[in-house]
Amino acid sequence: MAVASHLISRMPAVASIRASVLIPLVQQIDKRSGKTDLLLASHGILRSQLEDPYAVLPMARYVALFEEAATITGEPALGARMGTGFKPADIGPIGMVFALSPTIRSAFERLSKYVNAVQGATSSGVFEENGDFVWSYRIVDPAMWPRRQDSEFTIAASCQLVRSCFRRGWRPIEIQLEHHAPRDAGVLERICGAPILFGQSGNRIVMNKAEADRVHRAEDKSLIEILERHIGDLVNEPAAGDIVTEKVQALISIYLGRKPVTVATLAAELKMSTRSLQRRLSEEGVSLRDLVRQHRQTLAAHYLGDRHAAPMSEIARVLGYADNTVLWRALRSWEKKGNHLSSRR
């Protein structure tokens, strides 16, 4: 489950997360490894993006980064361990609504309802099964795999929310995780405080129904209403004229350096004809070429202005160029057009 300490703008339609989700993860990598910037660069992420907590990033990059971070730090249960320090404020108004809810059931019902204000491509819900109360969480995009770290972080963080907001010694009946059992399964059981079933169809927390329905506090309905109204504004779809450009920008960020970024490719991803996509972008005053160039210039300005940046061959790959020569040609072209970038010779 992605975290965000501040939320003031709506999420774009393409699966994204708030940039601030990376802050605790980057801090962990900084403590355990000196490869943070190189790792971020390999996933097309700039450290400078973390300075804006309102910015959004492609969720696929976050999931992949989390997996690699666990490997680099030598901590297979990195996500679960990070979840033990999770606080309601880490997901802004959603966390506050969770904390103010009178019962564990109502807290998870609200979390499920508003999770898409924090991240996209996510399915979350509550249901009863065999007399127990169950909360489920799953990233719906199968291409985002492996995703062990996100799953374990989300489950551990959710358990921590219950302990901090309702009862310190709370334990679920059972935890279900979609990935196969790792070697360090015992660590996860100790963190979650419950037996774990692996290889399930989703990630779930199974709870005692009576305990989930126990009233812990009187609800401040006026405050809840204000918070839910604010969250509702965040979840609403953006204006129709902005949707296509935002989707394309997100897809460029996801695909650049990994697969061809063409009108045909993006149109297929967005389930549109190439003609319709070109027309919509034209109506919004942009073109795919413009959007790709803008994204490349942003990345290039950061990498080339950083004396500790990755090698030129790596920068060229991240920007989606075949080699250094093509990158230099692009840089010269931008300079001729007045887009001056700091460069390393």
Image (cartoon, rainbow, N blue to C red):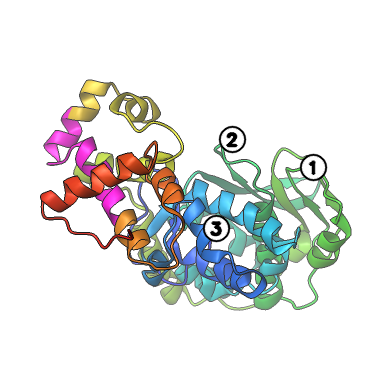
Seen at 62% across and 45% down, the residue is 138
The type of residue carrying mark 1 is His
The type of residue carrying mark 3 is Leu
Principal SS element in the magenta part?
helix
- How many numbered marks, from 0 up? 3
In this rendering, the label closer to the viewer, 3 or 1: 3
Seen at 20% across and 48% down, the residue is 332
Tell which circle, 2 or 3, labels the residue nearer the N-terminal end. Answer: 3
Q: CA distance from mark 1 to mark 2?
A: 15 Å
Can residue 25 be seen here?
yes
Seen at 18% across and 49% down, the residue is 334
Q: Is residue 179 left or right of residue 39?
A: right
Q: Circle 3 — which element? A: helix
Q: Position of residue 268 (x, y in %)?
A: 37, 24
Q: Quadrant of the C terminus?
A: bottom left
Q: Circle 1 — which element? A: loop
The type of residue carrying mark 2 is Pro
The answer to whether the residue labelled 2 contacts the one labelled 3, judged by CB atoms less than 8 Å apart, is no
Q: Circle 2 — which element? A: loop
Identify the residue under disc 2: 142
Q: Position of residue 203 (x, y in %)?
A: 70, 48
Q: Position of residue 157 (x, y in %)?
A: 66, 65
Identify the residue under disc 1: 180
Seen at 72% across and 67% down, the residue is 81
Q: CA distance from mark 2 to mark 3?
A: 23 Å
Residue 39, quarter of the rendered image: bottom right
* Segment colored magenta: 279-298
> Which labelled disc corresponds to residue 39?
3
Indicate whether residue 293 is drawn in magenta. Answer: yes
Can residue 247 be seen here?
no
Q: Quadrant of the N terminus?
A: bottom right
